[in-house]
Image (spheres, rainbow, N blue to C red):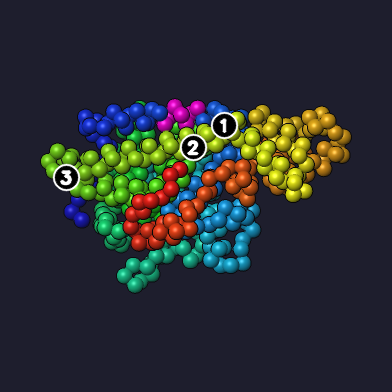
Amino acid sequence: MREFPGSLTLMPEEGRAGYGHLLDLSFSLAAESAELGGMMRAPTRRAIARLVRAMDCYYSNLIEGREARPKDIQRALSENYSSDPAVRDKQVEARAHIKVQERIDDGAYDRLGLGTELIRSIHKDFYLHMPESFRSVELNGVRHRVVPGEFRNLYVVVGRHEAVAPEMVPGFMAHFEAGYRGVGPAFSLIAAAASHHRLAWIHPFLDGNGRTARLYTHAWFRRFTKGADLWSVSRGLARTLGDYRSKLARADYPPQGGTDGRGTLSASGLAEFCAYFLETALDQVRFMRDMLAPDTLLPRLRLFVQHEAEAGRLDPRAFAILELAYLRGHVPKGEVETLLGVSERHARRIVTPLVEQGLLESEGRSAPFTIGFPLEEADLVFPRLFQMPAAATQAKFLDAVRSDDAVDDMPAP
């Protein structure tokens, strides 16, 4: 390719039609995400964040055509791997993804800023723990090993997009870092969306660019948005895969006429992509707000306990403990007997199955109980969180991922 780094514009043009809409979306996203983050106590939030990391992993990998079932992800987090090599490899991959996102959420990468060092570290930490079978790619009939965190040294074509020449990647990434470093806080969420496309367009690694870009964008959201650990933009992208791919492709176009920007790529295409991306993120914030609101979550939790009680797995009085743990964040162990109005021995019989199922957690003998949300129960307590498309649409979805075609009829969130 003949393009040079300086010709790549990094942000939508401020004076262009629709820029005000981008600002409105970014302000709404920041405000509503912060509101979501303030809905619950810290221990409850940590439990939800663990669930969201698994959900983000599920959908981000699904976009790449690799589906690890929630129960397999749950087992992988306990290092309980399948004897089936194909399932095991997906479990190892899922665990690697979740561990990187956990490091992002815990602030382990904060010292790296939001530039090239962070991007390379995300890719490195992800691929160092990938299964061996996923650490190479085939190009023109030859297999090439993916070096964790290292920029590619080969030419690649992704769909209809010919990525920048390998010798140009370091220069483009330096331009990327310098340009986004100068973005002010008021425009940071627009930059998160724009940088997602620009990183995908540069395609710096031999493989893993899509998931690295989505993890990187999560780091952007976390840095500038409170509550970003409680929702997953990947869920929205996966469920509108046709739009995601078509908007990415539209932003790859060269300028469409003399009024469509002066850089290498279409200014209107980038603006359209940013609008789609921010709308998708905002939709997911609202989905999780509705899912986590006490007046909707607690009735579902009560029904779950009733279902488990009818099956003989829980005592129906267990709901009172879970309700208090969700609302207050913790339940001191010494209060359980009083809360339930039973003896210590009877209280233990009620609590033990909750702990065994992962619905109650405790960090030590004297530490209080906090709520947990095991993935194996997520479909009952959180309907549609991991919902797959209907069988016919699901087959088309996976075909589209493999062929890089668009899917136009994915179900709405």
Question: In x, y percent, where is residue 48?
Answer: 58, 39
State the SS at label 2. helix
Amino acid type, residue under disc 3 in the picture: Gln
Q: Earlier in the sequence, mark 1 or mark 3?
A: 3
Residue at mark 3 to residue at mark 2: CA–CA distance: 36 Å
Disc 3 vs disc 2: which is toward the camera? 2
Inspect this view and state whether residue 313 appears.
no
- Which class describes the residues within 10 Å of circle 2: few (<14), some (14-19), or many (20+)? some
Inspect this view and state whether residue 274 appears.
yes
398 and 374: which one is in front?
398
**Which residue is drawn at the image coordinates 18% and 45% (left, top)?**
255
Quadrant containing the C terminus is: top left
280 and 125: which one is in front?
280
Disc 1 vs disc 3: which is toward the camera? 1
Q: Which mark is residue 293?
A: 1
Q: Is residue 230 left or right of residue 317?
A: left
Amino acid type, residue under disc 1 in the picture: Ala
State the SS at label 1. loop
Which region of the structure is painted magenta? 29-35
Q: Earlier in the sequence, mark 3 or mark 2?
A: 3
Name the residue tied to disc 2. 287
Amino acid type, residue under disc 2 in the picture: Phe
**Which residue is drawn at the image coordinates 72% and 36% (left, top)?**
319
Name the residue tied to disc 3. 256
**Which residue is drawn at the image coordinates 22% and 32% (left, top)?**
16
Residue at mark 1 to residue at mark 2: CA–CA distance: 10 Å
Question: In x, y percent, where is residue 330?
Answer: 69, 32
Q: Is 147 placed above or below 309 here?
A: below
